[in-house]
Image (cartoon, rainbow, N blue to C red):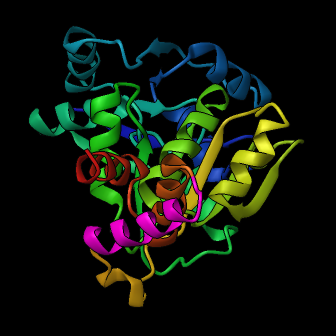
Amino acid sequence: MGTLYVIGTPIGNMEDVTLRQLETLKNVDFICAEDTRVTLKLLSRYDIKKPLVSYHEHSGREVADRITDRILNGENAGVVTDAGMPCISDPGENLVKICYEKNIDVKVIPGPSAVVSALAISGLNTSRFTFEGFLSVTKKQRFEHLESLKDEQRTMIFYEAPHKLIPTLSDMLEYFGDRKISLCRELTKIYEEVLRMTISEAIEYYSERSPRGEYVLVVEGKIHTETDNITVDDAMEEIRKLVKCGEKPVNACKTIAKKYGFKKSELYSQFIIYNS
């Protein structure tokens, strides 16, 4: 019986590769790749010639069974992702699970991780954190996910694509309030950039500039203050005072939601009910 090797690869800069990674890539019988074209560039850079098998998020159980059958017959396989550690928010996770189902030995050849790299340079608390991956594009699942995290005290790490960045930041502001955030893009590449600001400042910044590149968002966990005991009724009272002073209800709800960490929509709905 062979072995499955989970092999980390560079997250951007191809020089961020270890001797052990290269040696393993040379010695396995075949390599399972998320995108064979991307992996081929890395192999070509280091003059490694190995058969590539496509294994991605749309690969079904049949593909995984063919791969594991080869391993059961004595071949050694490597699994890589396009960048970083396989199996972290990556289809390789399923392949590893199936290997364990079939009692196939799995070994790790560690490499760079965008998650840990972004956390290390975020300037936020690194002692405790939670990796949340990509938020769902389905609104119900997305909002349930954010709702479950609104009281999370650990630093939170998310992945996001450039075309969804502003909507994601807006949703985070709605559910988390205006917290500190580190926006890391194109890590280890030529145009690497790390911006440290608040969520509202990030929305304003990217409203004037088009987001580019893949992002890792590192968000400050909830910090408990004396305002944590503020109830919805207390918030309603402050909203009514602002409205009496001439503030539009929707703006008053937004101000108080931001101040105390409530959802603007929740406060506005309550305001309508209380004043209907």
Give residue 159's position: percent from left, percent from top: 53, 43
Magenta-drawn stretch contains 104: no
Give residue 62's position: percent from left, percent from top: 21, 8
Residue ID at (82%, 51%) = 193
Q: Nearer the viewer, residue 225 or 54?
A: 225
Which quadrant of the rendered structure holds the C terminus?
top left
Image quadrant where residue 197 sits = bottom right
Name the dominant secondary structure of the magenta segment. Answer: helix
Give residue 12's position: percent from left, percent from top: 74, 40
User: Range of the magenta residues?
Assistant: 232-247
Q: Is residue 2 visible?
A: no
Q: Is residue 160 left or right of residue 189?
A: left
Q: Is residue 190 above or below residue 94?
A: below
Image quadrant where residue 222 sits = bottom left
Which quadrant of the rendered structure holds the N terminus?
top left
Q: Is residue 13 left or right of residue 234?
A: right
Q: Is residue 2 left or right of residue 128?
A: left
Residue ID at (69%, 46%) = 203
